[in-house]
């Protein structure tokens, strides 16, 4: 696995139709990209993955891209950013955006999260809507989004490894009736069932366009981002109630030495009482979180990791605009 961390963040936003500009920039920035060999009918486009919290959007993107890029939890609203997963083949490059689940924002952080959803929808060439096969009916908010768009739209009924065939068929029929032009598929992200159906839809509907990213780039997020997310995933796994939702993680330093990666992380909570719980008796809880996160990091980065963690309180960080942008949620 090779990730280009130096890649220009805003590059793809310059002009999605400006082919020459892209190719020119690519030549300048990434000389070894085999631009001459890109077939004329190469397809490339952006896919926004949207849906309610906990329906399996992140699991699905990871499965489609074949890498664990987005953290997953059985708790709702784990994903806070737009996370890119890029899948490149001989004739195509599909850029998936995993997004936070659709909610009515109750505080500033959630407003920022919904902004990331809208951004992904604005950039999209295709919408991939995800629903939970274990929940009956058609979600009106998702239907609204799909109805408002003229893009190719695929709706997947996920988690069919757990639901009966009858329930799955009823749900698919309800969506088809609500929006006849919708393509509807039954899948299981967890069991990787019918991902080929999704791929077929993507290949058919992705526009002919040169690749937006170097051919071996798999995401746009940085190493620091992934390190922080792996810690946050363990906070979700280990702690209950509001604490995971009140925690953000910042990487203070990330140094690569020949032997190992030295990472120093700050876990920021909203209250002193949350800090005490995060630390646990004699630091037991934070130690467990850090150990699990370190093991995940070693798998992901393919290298030994030395991880140190600190816990800090920043009162109400998730409810104040100024603090949010300091913590990387500026919109
Ligand atoms: P998101 O909030 O929509 O991104 O959902 P996640 O990908 O974080 O998944 C939420 C929960 O659903 C996790 O516990 C996943 O393991 C579980 N999940 C996701 N896809 C499937 C699936 O196809 N089948 C089953 N049984 N569980 C799934
Ligand atoms: Mg998610």
Image (cartoon, rainbow, N blue to C red):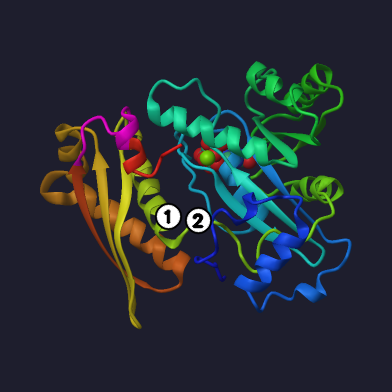
- Give the SS element for disc 1: helix
Q: Residue 276 location, x and y as percent? A: 15, 39
Q: Residue 222 location, x and y as percent? A: 46, 59
* Spatial separation of the CA atoms under disc 1 and disc 2: 6 Å
Q: Along the line of sight, which residue is nearer the eye, 285 or 6? A: 6
- Give the SS element for disc 2: loop
Q: Residue 275 location, x and y as percent? A: 18, 39
Label 1: few (<14), some (14–19) or many (≥20) C-alpha neighbours in 10 Å: few
* 91 magenta-colored: no
Quarter holding residue 148: top right
Is residue 41 visible from the viewing direction of this image? yes
Residue farthest toward the bottom in the current orientation of the protein: 258
Tell me what residue is drawn at x 61 percent, y 65 percent.
Answer: 217
Most prominent secondary structure in the magenta stretch?
A: loop
Q: Residue 104 location, x and y as percent? A: 50, 20
Residue, disc 2: 221
- Residue 14, placed above or below residue 120: below
Q: Along the line of sight, which residue is nearer the eye, 331 or 308? A: 331
Q: Quadrant of ligand 1?
A: top right
Query: Marks 1 and 2: CB-CB under 8 Å?
Result: yes
Tell me what residue is drawn at x 56 percent, y 71 percent.
Answer: 2
- Residue 325, placed above or below residue 192: above
* 318 magenta-colored: yes
Tell me what residue is drawn at x 75 percent, y 40 percent.
Answer: 126
Residue, disc 1: 225
Provide the residue span drawn in magenta. 313-323
Is residue 159 visible from the viewing direction of this image? no
Residue farthest toward the left in the current orientation of the protein: 282
Label 2: few (<14), some (14–19) or many (≥20) C-alpha neighbours in 10 Å: some
- Residue 235, placed above or below residue 38: above
Quarter holding residue 268: top left
- Residue 231, placed above or below residue 119: below
């Amino acid at each position: 696995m090779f990730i280009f961390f130096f890649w220009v963040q805003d590059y793809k936003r310059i002009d999605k139709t400006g082919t020459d500009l892209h190719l020119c920039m690519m030549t300048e920035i990434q000389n070894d990209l085999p631009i001459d060999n890109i077939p004329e009918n190469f397809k490339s486009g952006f896919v926004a993955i949207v849906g309610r919290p906990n329906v399996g959007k992140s699991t699905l993107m990871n499965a489609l891209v074949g890498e664990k890029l987005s953290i997953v939890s059985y708790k709702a609203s784990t994903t806070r950013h737009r996370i890119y997963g890029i899948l490149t083949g001989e004739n195509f490059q599909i850029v998936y955006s995993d997004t936070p689940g659709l909610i009515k924002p109750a505080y500033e952080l959630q407003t920022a999260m919904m902004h990331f959803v809208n951004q992904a929808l604005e950039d999209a060439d295709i919408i991939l809507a995800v629903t939970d096969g274990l929940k009956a009916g058609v979600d009106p908010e998702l239907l609204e989004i799909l109805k408002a768009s003229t893009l190719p739209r695929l709706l997947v009924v996920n988690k069919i490894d757990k639901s009966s065939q009858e329930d799955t068929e009823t749900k698919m029929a309800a969506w088809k009736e609500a929006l006849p032009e919708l393509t509807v598929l039954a899948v299981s992200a967890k069991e990787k069932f019918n991902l080929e159906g999704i791929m077929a839809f993507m290949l058919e509907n992705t526009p002919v366009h040169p690749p937006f990213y170097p051919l071996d780039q798999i995401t746009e997020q940085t190493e620091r981002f992934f390190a922080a997310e792996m810690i946050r995933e363990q906070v979700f796994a280990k702690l209950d109630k509001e604490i995971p939702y009140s925690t953000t993680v910042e990487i203070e330093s990330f140094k690569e030495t020949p032997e190992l990666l030295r990472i120093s992380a700050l876990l920021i909570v909203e209250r002193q009482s949350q800090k005490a719980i995060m630390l646990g008796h004699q630091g037991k809880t934070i130690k467990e979180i850090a150990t699990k996160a370190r093991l995940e990091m070693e798998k992901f980065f393919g290298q030994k990791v030395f991880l140190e963690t600190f816990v800090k309180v920043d009162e109400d960080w998730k409810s104040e605009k100024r603090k949010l942008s300091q913590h990387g949620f500026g919109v």
